[in-house]
Image (cartoon, grey):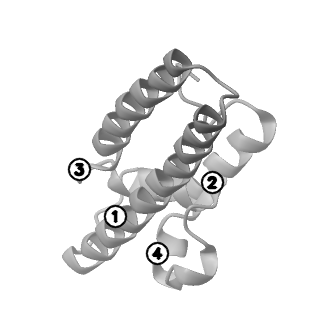
Amino acid sequence: MKKELSKRLKSIIADLAAKAHEREVRQRLEKLSDCLAHWKRGAIDTWDAIRELDRFRTNTKRLAQKYQRSTMTPLVVAGAIAAGFLRENEVSKEVLETLEQEIKFFKDGFADGTLSLADDDD
């Protein structure tokens, strides 16, 4: 992405990144909560629950790095839109137009399987 973004647009995109980050962490917390509920019922053993906790911690650190404000933030936001962590109707037309090609790239990649949201250790 070689577009020069205004400070205002960079700020809007940074806010969207923070929102997407929170939503992605929330999704992972739900998965962890389900795992702990299985452990509490005895459906999985303690060691499986601990492995899931470790995976959550590792993947949450990766997410923090992914969403850290940088020159890549617009690309990260485009991916979050394509993945559904941000809905297009909550993103300004200006941002959607600015990131149109990047959003299409991610949507196409998710659709054809060349891109995935799965973590390396899932």
Question: Is label 1 or label 3 in front?
Answer: 1
> What is the secondary structure assignment of the residue under circle 2?
helix
Q: Position of residue 99 (x, y in %)?
A: 50, 64
Residue located beneath label 2 in the image: 83
> What is the secondary structure assignment of the residue under circle 3?
loop
> What is the secondary structure assignment of the residue under circle 1?
helix
Amino acid at pointer 2: Ala
Which label belongs to residue 70? 3
Q: Nearer the viewer, residue 22 or 105?
A: 22
Rounded to the nearest angstrom, the CA distance separating label 1 from label 3 is 12 Å
Amino acid at pointer 4: Val
Residue located beneath label 1 in the image: 18
Q: Quadrant of residue 53?
A: top left
* Mark 1 neighbour density, 10 Å: few (under 14) some (14–19) many (20 or more): some
Q: Position of residue 97 (x, y in %)?
A: 54, 74
Does 67 sit left or right of 110 as displayed?
Answer: left
Q: Position of residue 28 (x, y in %)?
A: 52, 46
Does 71 sit left or right of 87 as displayed?
Answer: left
State if disc 4 and disc 1 touch (CB < 8 Å).
Answer: no
Q: Nearer the viewer, residue 71 or 80?
A: 80
The answer to whether residue 88 is above or below residue 1 is below
